[in-house]
Image (tube, grey):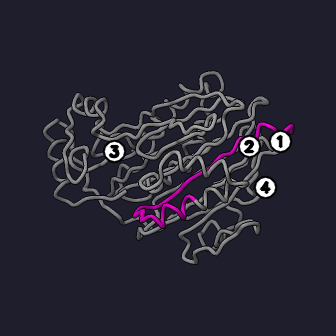
Amino acid sequence: MVCIGSLLRALVLRAAASAGRRRGPRVLCGRAADVRVTPRHGYGWRGFRAVAGRMMLDSSDPASPAEAAGQVQPQRRAAGAVAQAHDGGYASGGWEREDGKLSCGYSSFRGKRATMEDFYDVKLTEIDGQAVSLFGVFDGHGGSRAAEYLKEHLFENLLKHPEFLTDTKLAISETYQKTDADFLESEASAFRDDGSTASTAVLVGDHLYVANVGDSRAVISKAGKAMALSEDHKPNRIDERKRIENAGGIVIWAGTWRVGGVLAMSRAFGNRLLKPYVVAEPEIQEEQVNAEMECLVLASDGLWDVVENEEAVSLGKSEDAPESAARKLTEIAYSRGSADNITCIVVQFHHDKTG
């Protein structure tokens, strides 16, 4: 995401003041340091740990103090490996479920941006005998802290929700909004106002729940056709503009449509100065995973700005390894001139596996 100048930020501050809202600290743009990437690679992931009496595979567990400090460069599997950047700006990896029916790969690249504000998360656990897989892409703007907070807390909070198995949609909706409130509280004294998108996919048994806040996107291939399971939250969407204006906000053209002339998306985590116009309430789609479901692609807008839905899922299902597909997608986006961080997760479904 690209922050705009102080003049436009002043517009929303005045709008917020006129609506009777307390003014907060000025937004600091582009001050975050590069993201730490601590991926897990191959079929035997590190980072096993007990969570509420169940075993979890967790992409966020550092394997060593050096890696936790961001001092270890990520290593790929030997098969199909290509040269990687030496500045910590690139990481990729892959994983396959024990029964062979699902595999995933991810690739995250700083690209042409000076800092890395994308984060991602992949988790596998089992609850009451039910296999659960969680995938998330978090694209920060105005800094990396909001996206980093989501990686650290969003799925942890969701798995603790008492209705997670019985009413998964409700659990996702409540967890998104509670995590947003917790983040704002944790940053109450911070001299910044960054935010983040969240595009997540939660697979509980054979039910897939895709939840979206912002302009990251989730697309599936179903019976050979690309199907978006999220719609970008843009301020000029008729329903979003109406919601913003009903809350007392304004949508202004400033190179593109922006909330208060500042933010080019209408929903996000964080962004304290734009509450209640910019909300973290997710839109959720549910799909049953059956023989028609071939693959899922989650990605930040650094990919979707230059790659069409159909092309993304076509490559996602045609590659033998989803990690290879994820790498190729980031490389394609970069070669086409994407000016943003680029992060994507590719999930392949293997229905012919017997376990």
Mark 4 belongs to which amino acid?
Tyr
Tell me if residue 190 can be seen. yes
Mark 4 vs mark 2: which is more N-terminal?
A: 4
Q: Which residue is mark 4?
A: 43
Cα separation, mark 1 vs mark 2, equals 8 Å
Question: Which residue is label 3 attached to?
Answer: 265
Which numbered disc, 1 or 4, marks the residue that appears first in the sequence? 4
Residue 309 horizontal/vertical position (percent): 50, 45
Q: Which mark is residue 336?
A: none
Residue 348 among magenta residues: yes
* In this view, the mark in front (4 or 2): 2
Could you tell me residue 199's position as x and y percent?
A: 50, 43
Provide the secondary structure element on which disc 3 rests.
Answer: loop
Residue sitting nearer the eye, 98 or 248: 98
Are the two marked residues, 1 and 4, in contact with CB atoms closer than 8 angstroms? no
For the residues marked 1 and 3, what is the alpha-carbon distance in whole angstroms? Answer: 39 Å
Q: SS class of the residue under badge 2?
A: strand
Q: Amino acid at mark 3?
A: Met
The answer to which of marks 4 and 3 sits earlier in the sequence is 4
Mark in front: 3 vs 2: 2
Residue matched to label 2: 102
